[in-house]
Amino acid sequence: FEHVSVVSSTNLSRYDMKPSEMLLDGDSLVVIGSAHVKNNGSQPPDCGLGRGSWEAAIAGAALPLVTLQLWNISDRAAPLLVQTYEMEGRLLAARLVDGYAYLVVE
């Protein structure tokens, strides 16, 4: 490991998620983590949650979310966040197969 060095560092805490998995495919990096939706009861959260989930949020429950971030790392010194996806549930497993990320969410 004598030729190993840190090229860049990205603070993911600013994205309101707790990272748990990373999948690398060439110049694309997928970061997968968890977050929770908390609602003040005034409007549905803007993350595509279904009616039953919205009712739970009204009741004050924190809803678990799986957050998936797609990063362009072609410039290793300056990674670029390309897209963020969120889905209700908890991550059970993630795999990268032939350039596709597969997630198992409960």
Image (tube, grey):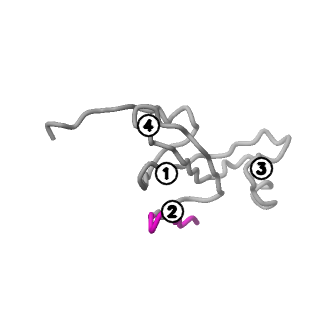
* Residue type beneath disc 2: Ala
Mark 4 surroundings: few (<14), some (14-19) or many (≥20) residues within 10 A: few
- Extent of the magenta region: 95-106
> Label 3 vs label 2: CA separation?
34 Å
Above or below residue 79? Residue 63 is: below
Foreground label between 4 and 1:
4
Q: Was residue 103 drawn as part of the magenta stretch in this picture?
A: yes
Check disc 4 and give the amino acid type.
Asp
Q: Quarter of the image containing the N terminus?
A: top left
Q: Is residue 9 left or right of residue 69?
A: left
Residue 7 in magenta stretch: no
Mark 3 touching mark 2, by CB under 8 A?
no
The disc at residue 99 is none
Which residue in the structure is indicated by mark 3? 59
Q: Secondary structure at mark 4?
A: loop
Task: Between label 4 and label 2, give the one nearer the viewer.
Answer: 4
User: Could you tell me which residue is drawn at 56 percent across and 40 percent down?
Assistant: 81
Residue underneath mark 4: 75
Residue on which the image places disc 2 = 101
Type of the residue with mark 3 = Ala
Distance (Cα) linking label 4 and label 2: 22 Å
Dot 3, how many residues are within 10 Å of its Cα: few (below 14), some (14-19), or many (20+)? few
The mark that comes first in sequence, 4 or 1, is: 1
Residue at the disc numbered 1: 30
77 relative position to 2: left or right: right
Amino acid type, callout 1 = Val
Q: Mark 3 to mark 4: distance in Å?
A: 45 Å
